[in-house]
Image: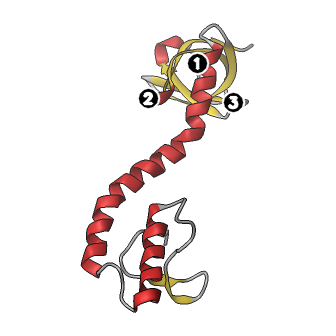
Amino acid sequence: TPSGLEVQARPHAALGLDRYTPVTSPLRRYPDLVNEAQVVHFLCSGQPRWSESALTELLQTISPVLDAVGQVQRFRPRYWKLLYFRQQGDKVWWPGVITEENDAFVSVSLQDQGMFVRGRRKLFDDRAHPGLRVDVRIGKVHPLYNEIMILEAATVD
């Protein structure tokens, strides 16, 4: 199962350990700082720094923040791509391939840029189908809001 934050140490199947908890870089992850502080305090005093109930309360406080941080980290590469598209302006035509279409939207893969974009169905002609090569003009790009829109589409013959 994927790792998760818990108060009790659990078995680690891949390492074959009965109990496991990460204690890596306290500069990188706040939970690692908490784990390291708990271990150091125990080694120095023989007692844990925080009780199980205190750790549970701390976990409830930091979990939503860590989830938000994870979302930002996953979004970061897309942010820079969106910024690039915005810098190029809305006059550039980008080659792509339709990957999906329905009555409302058409999804296009911009393979050279490693991006998927969507546009309203009415921007595409009646021949639109998955696998069709198209050129699209991009606009209304807002990197901070994760927004990008196809403004115009043309079938490649």
For residue 113, which numbered disc appears in the image? 3
Label 3 or label 2, whichever comes before in sequence order? 3
Name the residue tied to disc 1: 86
Between 45 and 117, the one lying in front of the other is: 45
Label 3 or label 1, whichever comes before in sequence order? 1
At 46% from the left and 82% from the top, the residue drawn is 39
Mark 3 vs 1: CB contact within 8 A: no
Marks 3 and 1, how far apart at CA: 13 Å
Query: Horizontally, is 67 left or right of 90 in the view?
Result: left
SS class, disc 3: loop
Marks 3 and 2, how far apart at CA: 19 Å
Marks 1 and 2, how far apart at CA: 13 Å
At 32% from the left and 78% from the top, the residue drawn is 50
Name the residue tied to disc 2: 145
Residue 108 visible, this angle: no
Q: In which quadrant will I find the C terminus?
A: top right
Image position of 151 with respect to 96: above or below: above
Which amino acid type corresponds to the residue marked 2 in the rendered image?
Tyr
Q: Where is residue 6 in the image (x, y as percent from the top left)?
A: 38, 73
Between disc 3 and disc 2, the foreground one is: 2
Which amino acid type corresponds to the residue marked 1 in the rendered image?
Arg
SS class, disc 1: helix
Residue 26 visible, this angle: yes
The residue at the far front in this view is 44
Between 96 and 65, the one lying in front of the other is: 65
Which amino acid type corresponds to the residue marked 3 in the rendered image?
Gln
Between 84 and 25, the one lying in front of the other is: 25
At 28% from the left and 63% from the top, the residue drawn is 60
The residue at the far top in this view is 91
Say few, some or many: other residues with alpha carbon within 10 Å of mark 3 (under 14 / 14 to 19 / 20 or more).
Answer: few
